[in-house]
Amino acid sequence: MSPRPSPRASLGTPPRVRDGLSAALIVLACLLLPFGALAAWAAYGLTDTGRYVRTMAPLAGDPAVRDAFADAVGAELTDELEPRLRGMAGPFVRDAARSFTRTDAFRAGWDTANRVTHTALLHAVRQDAGGRPVTVDIAPVAAEVKRRLAAGNVPFAHRIPVPHTEVAVLPAPEADRLRKGYDVLEVAAFWLPSTTVALAVTGIAIAACRRRAVVATALGIALGGALLALAIAVGRHLTLTDLPVGLHRPAAEAVYDALTATLRTASWLLLALGLTAATITWLTGRHSRGARRAHACAPAVHGSAPEPNRTRA
């Protein structure tokens, strides 16, 4: 038995036209869903400094991140040494840097560095930086490594300089492009999700068979979640492939996975929610059709038996 049309399906626009328009709106909503989720995550998730610091905090215990940090700081301090001291003190400097990454001081410094870096990036994308790169000073970390070396009686530790090195975390051209993209992102983060919901609701409302439209929308949500998960995986591959030479790849992998953890969770929730809603709607529709069919057959089964023919005496 075919699904019953809406009571208003026979009024005005023909059901076939209503279903066609409904399908177009639902398909468009489902295509916009991954883009809306990405825009909302980038605009509202990544731009919250407190949330960003909490997301990055566990990475202070990641071995790949600690090694990358220790190598960078150790190399920076070693380069500042006099040439005749590099061969002697260089290994001690790197060992001290690695030892420092296992302390509470490093974890506190890691949170502070992430907070400072994130604040600098937000300032760069929200205001005109005048074509300057985004930089962070690593002098506080260098000073702590020097102090630990001196406390360990490492030779010539007191002669290690502590330069105020401005490390560029975002080159000037990239900062300008990021600023322009951020302006578009702020608009998209509001309008894309809102448009997606409006299109889906409208598509369901005008459908001649709303139950079928709900099932189609739920399956579209599940497909949108799957496409979002695929986009995260592709983005990870492209990001790691385009890393500059010399950048620590395992550390970059850990950072990418930490930043996209919320987005990955959202993609799997959309997939599970869509499949669950589609299954429940389909099962309830099947049950209601069975009940109607049973009700239609009831008079023939439970009706009174016909009177037998009377024969004349």
Image (spheres, grey):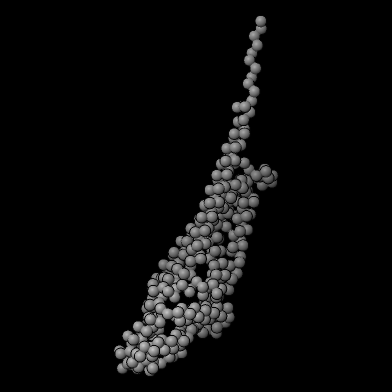
Residue 58 x, y percent position in the rendering: 46, 72
Q: Position of residue 177 (x, y in %)?
A: 52, 76
Tally of marks: 0
Give the residue at x 41% y 75%: 65
Q: Is 173 positioned to the left or the right of 299 in the image?
A: left
Residue 312 placement, left or right of 128: right
| Image quadrant where residue 51 sits | bottom right
Which of the image's four quarters has the N terminus?
A: top right
> Residue at position x 57%, y 57% from top?
29
Can you name the residue that lies furthest to the right here?
Answer: 11
The answer to whether 74 appears left or right of 21 in the picture is: left
Placement of 96 over or under 24, stated as above or below? below
* Quarter where residue 100 is shown: bottom left
Rendered view: 58 above or below 19? below
Does 22 sit left or right of 135 as displayed? right
Q: Nearer the viewer, residue 175 or 49?
A: 49
| Residue 21 visible, this orientation | no
Q: Position of residue 246 (x, y in %)?
A: 37, 78
In the rendered image, residue 252, in percent from the top left (x then y), is placed at 42, 73
The quadrant of the picture occupied by the C terminus is top right
Residue 41: which quarter of the image?
A: bottom right
Q: Is residue 44 visible?
A: yes
Vertically, is 93 above or below 274? below
Residue positioned most to the top: 313
Tell me which residue sits at (55%, 84%) in the image.
Answer: 130
Depth check: 260 or 304 in front?
304
